[in-house]
Image (cartoon, helix red, strand yellow):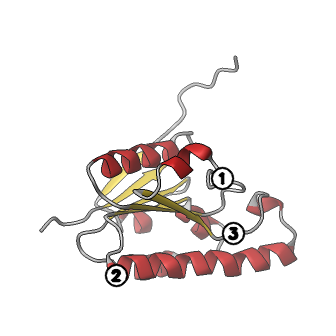
Amino acid sequence: MKQGLIHIYSGDGHGKSPAALGQAILSAAAGENVFIIQFLKGKGVKDSEFIQRLEPEIKIFRFEKSDENFDELSEEKKTDEIINIKNGLNFAKKVLATGECDLLILDEVLGLIDNKIITVEDLKNILETRDSETDIIMTGISLNDEICMLADEVSKIEMLKFKCW
């Protein structure tokens, strides 16, 4: 019986979500079922033809209805989206409790803490529902000691140089 690990891909650089997607592809190629739940991504990659071709091995979910960035929404729309986001988190809990997938990626979940939609304790409660064999990858910009304590492995992605073509 394998022991599932919790990974965090964090930092201000670009590449956290692509790194998680790369791991999703590797896991799917090994015959594993992968679920990706996206948060705070605006349109995200849900409608991507490429991602759709990866089903049924990789399933992507996005519970937010707006294609706009969360920060740009009116307070009324933010309230609606927070309900949708919490539905996504409840779905994540269900998936973890039932062991429905081998790898669960919670893309930009750390941003929910930054936006005060959830607390670190809320995230910890979600992670505690997991089947012990399920791997989890969480992505987001911010990282602190309390969040680090939730993970077995933490990777920090930082931008060293930015060049416009």
Find the distance from the CA under tag 1 to the CA under tag 3.
Answer: 13 Å
Asked if residue 28 is positioned above or below residue 81 in the image, the reply reads: above
- Please provide percent x and percent y for residue 154: 36, 53
- Identify the residue at image location x=78%, y=73%: 78
Sequence-first disc among 1 and 3? 1
- Please provide percent x and percent y for residue 66: 77, 64
The residue tagged 1 is: 47
Asked if residue 26 is positioned above or below residue 83 in the image, the reply reads: above
Q: Which mark is residue 98?
A: 2
Res. 23 visible in picture: yes
Q: Secondary structure at mark 2?
A: helix
In the picture as drawn, the residue positioned furthest to the left comes out as: 1
Q: Secondary structure at mark 3?
A: loop
User: Local crowd at mark 1 within 10 Å, few (<14), some, or many (≥20)?
Assistant: few
Q: Secondary structure at mark 1?
A: loop
Q: Amino acid at mark 3?
A: Glu
Sequence-first disc among 1 and 2? 1
